[in-house]
Image (spheres, grey):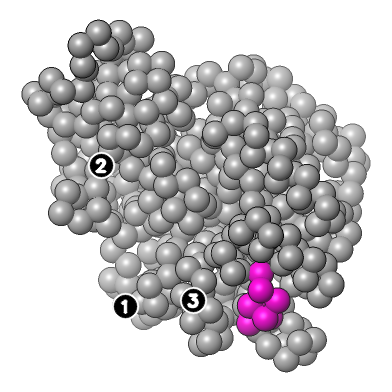
Amino acid sequence: MNIRFYNARIVVPKEENEDKLEVIFGEVWVKKDTIVYVGNGKNSENVCKENDIIIWNREIDVKGNVLIPGFKNAHTHTAMTFLRSYADDVPLQEWLQNHIFPKEALLKEEDAYYLNVLGIMEYLTSGITASFDMYLYPYATAKAAYNTGFRTMITSGLNNFTSSVKEVEEQYLKINEMSDRIKFVPGFHAEYTCSKELLEELSVFSNKYKLPVWTHNSETSLEVKECKERWGMSPTKFFDELGLHEYGGGGYHCIWMDDGDYDIFKKHNMSMITCPASNLKLNDGIAPITTFRKNGIKVGIGTDGPSSNNCLDMFREMFLVSGLANIKDQTANSINAEDVLKMAIKDGADAMGISECNAIAVGKKADIVMIDLNQPNMQPINNIIKNIVYSGSKTNVKMTVVNGEILYEDGQFNIGIDPVEVYEKANSIIREME
């Protein structure tokens, strides 16, 4: 699809420092899946060469609203939509052992497909254009993304009970052939659900293909305490001893870290993904975001799953990242709004290995979100970036574009399936488990 956006405010990297953001006024041109022009519309003569005139499928007057790169949900379990508001108000281990695991044992792969579609619909309404998914039935996750046009990175939830390294290798080889929008890297659920032998086998596989590895890491104080009792070291140190992160990757949550853990993250160029809403709800703790950042470690933002959050909303996560960092550091300016927005967009994309869609810039993939400024919560326009981070909400998302295709616009989905069918299927799945 060829799209011309004009009369737009646009959040772009600063020319002199790509780690900083600024807002310009002008146009964005999309040819098929790629951004081919960003500017004021007056210097576009070199975009179209002879015999290469762009025929627009849509010319969209943005009417002064703002275009941003899509949010990257850098940690989630999308198909857990079927357990939204099912098992709330209990601690993590009780939540997992007594409520989540028993229901997951009843989940079918066909069900997981529809539950992933439901989650993708919610992502689109929140301006999320890519997810980093770890859950059961990764083929269903990949199929849902493929059929709806969504972008996803998938990692395996390897553990002692539901999968094997052989299966992970098969998934890696097959899923990465499906589409350039869908990628797969190895991962494992957590130290406490994997034997040492299983992790050693995973380490051999990941090093064979030179792949990053991802896992839940140091999410609770109990997890860290029990790991030290078993192995005499922190989870991060244990994974390092096994050679699991020789080619990078990272950890989700990373709340209860030892001082030496940061050096290991730096050594292997690993990233950390914070999930503040889920961690608050489960009383896991507050992640040391500023300590990671001061150590030069990239930090992305995730929602975690819809059963522990329960909302797949990047606006809420961004506000919590800022507010909780202030509480943790006992200051009012721990992380500024621009850095939080960059974490939700660029840093998350880079951590996921999808830097091709981390900015609105020429040559990048067209993953773009239009934010409606003409609503009370976005007025007056004193500072657009701060408005997005501190007062923005899902209601401000007018349009979500993934890979150059408009998948959501003004409350309507363009994903190849009727939303009513998805809602009915999701409700029947959980009813059949009762």
Q: Quadrant of residue 182?
A: top right
Measure the alpha-carbon separation of dots 3 and 2: 32 Å
Task: Name the element at disc 2.
Answer: strand
- Residue 354 drawn at (x, y percent): 47, 46
Q: First in sequence: mark 1 or mark 2? A: 2
- Residue 137 drawn at (x, y percent): 78, 42
Location of mark 2 (residue): 11
Q: Quadrant of residue 233?
A: bottom right
Cβ atoms under marks 1 and 2 closer than 8 Å: no
Depth check: 78 or 184 in front? 184
Total of numbered circles in the picture? Answer: 3
Cβ atoms under marks 1 and 3 closer than 8 Å: no
Location of mark 3 (residue): 267
Tell me if 82 is positioned left or right of 403 in this view.
right
Where 339 sits versus 267, above or below? above
Measure the alpha-carbon separation of dots 1 and 2: 28 Å
What are the residue bounds of the magenta stretch?
A: 237-244
Label ID, residue 331: 1
Q: Is residue 238 magenta?
A: yes
Task: Name the element at disc 1.
Answer: loop
Where 79 sits versus 18, above or below? above
Q: Residue at x 38, y 64 (%)?
A: 322
